[in-house]
Image (cartoon, rainbow, N blue to C red):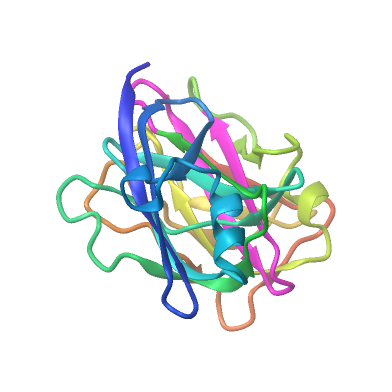
Amino acid sequence: MANVDTYGSVIATNGRTIPILNAATTEATEDEILTNATWTGAAQNLGTYADQMGNFVVGSGVWKCETGPTWNYVRSAGKVKLVLPMCSNKGAGSNGLPASVPYPKRLDSGDSLIAMANATSVRTFALAVACSNGEYHVFEYTATGASSGQGHELLSVVTSQGIGTTLQGRTITHWYAVNGNNTTQLTSDLMLLDGAGIAVASVSPTASAGDSAIVFQSVGPRGVRVHLNSKVVYTTNA
C-alpha cells in the first residue's frame, strides 16, 4: 500500500488549535497522526501536546486524507474517547470543515489520534457513532464479495465485537458512515437492526474519496437505543 499525506486541525472550545500531520500514512493500515512539527516545535502525541496547553477540550476539528479517509478516533487508555469529522482533500471535500463534534472531550496526556486512510483496492465500510452519554465508537467491515443473509456486519475497530455487545443500553444520537470502495457494489444503506433483525434506523454512507465532508448527523429527534442483539449491516451484490 502507498503512503499518503494526512493532516488537519483539532480545535478547542475556546478556539485554541493543534495542527496535525502524518506525511507517510500507510493506506489500509492503522496509523497514528501526530502534531505538525512546523507549528508545534516537534511531532508529538496529540494528547501529550494538548496536556501541555492545559485543559484542552475539543469542540471541533477535521482529519483530511490525500486519497480518502476510512476512520479516525482518539484512543485513550485503550478506549475510543472521541471521533473527528473527516474528508478527502480532493475536490470540494473540505467544504464546511472543520466541523463540530457532538460531545466535546478533554484531551489528556497519552491520548492518541489513530486513523486509517482508504486504499482504492480495499472495500472497508466504516461507521462512527456518538451516544447520549458522550461515548463514541467506530465500527468497520471489509467486503470481499456479495453479502448473504442479513448482510455484512460491522465490528468494533477496538474489540472486534458487534454494536450490540459494544454499546448495549446506549442511545446513539449522531453518526456518519463511509462506504470505502463499495459504490458500485452497494445494494443498501447502512442499517441498524434490532434483536429481531428488523431495521430501526439507517444512514447513507459518504464516498471515501468523494466531494462531501464527512460530518456527524443527528439520528432522528430522539436517537436510537442499542440492544444486546443489535447489529449494523449493509448488503452488496459483489
The residue under the point 74% across, 42% down is 162
Please say whether residue 64 is visible from this viewpoint: no
Total tally of numbered discs in the picture: 0
| Left or right: residue 175 compared with residue 123 | right
Which percent across, then down, holds residue 171? 72, 70
The residue under the point 76% across, 47% down is 77
Q: Residue lying furthest left in this view?
A: 91
Q: Residue lying furthest bottom in this view?
A: 221
**Considering only vertical position in the picture, is 94 above or below 90?**
below
Q: What stretch of residues is rendered in magenta?
A: 118-142
Near-viewer residue (202 or 91): 91
Based on the picture, tell me whether residue 227 belongs to the magenta stretch: no
**Considering only vertical position in the picture, is 104 above or below 37?**
below
The residue under the point 33% across, 19% down is 2
**Considering only vertical position in the picture, is 16 above or below 126?**
below
The residue under the point 74% across, 72% down is 133
Based on the picture, tell me whether residue 129 belongs to the magenta stretch: yes
Which percent across, then down, holds residue 45? 55, 44
Which percent across, then down, holds residue 75? 65, 47
Near-viewer residue (8 or 148): 8
Please say whether residue 80 is visible from this viewpoint: yes
**Considering only vertical position in the picture, is 69 above or below 203?**
above
| Left or right: residue 16 compared with residue 223 | left
Residue 193 placement: quadrant: bottom right
Q: Main secondary structure of the magenta part?
A: strand
Quarter of the image with the C terminus is: top left
Which percent across, then down, holds residue 52? 58, 60
Near-viewer residue (175 or 195): 175
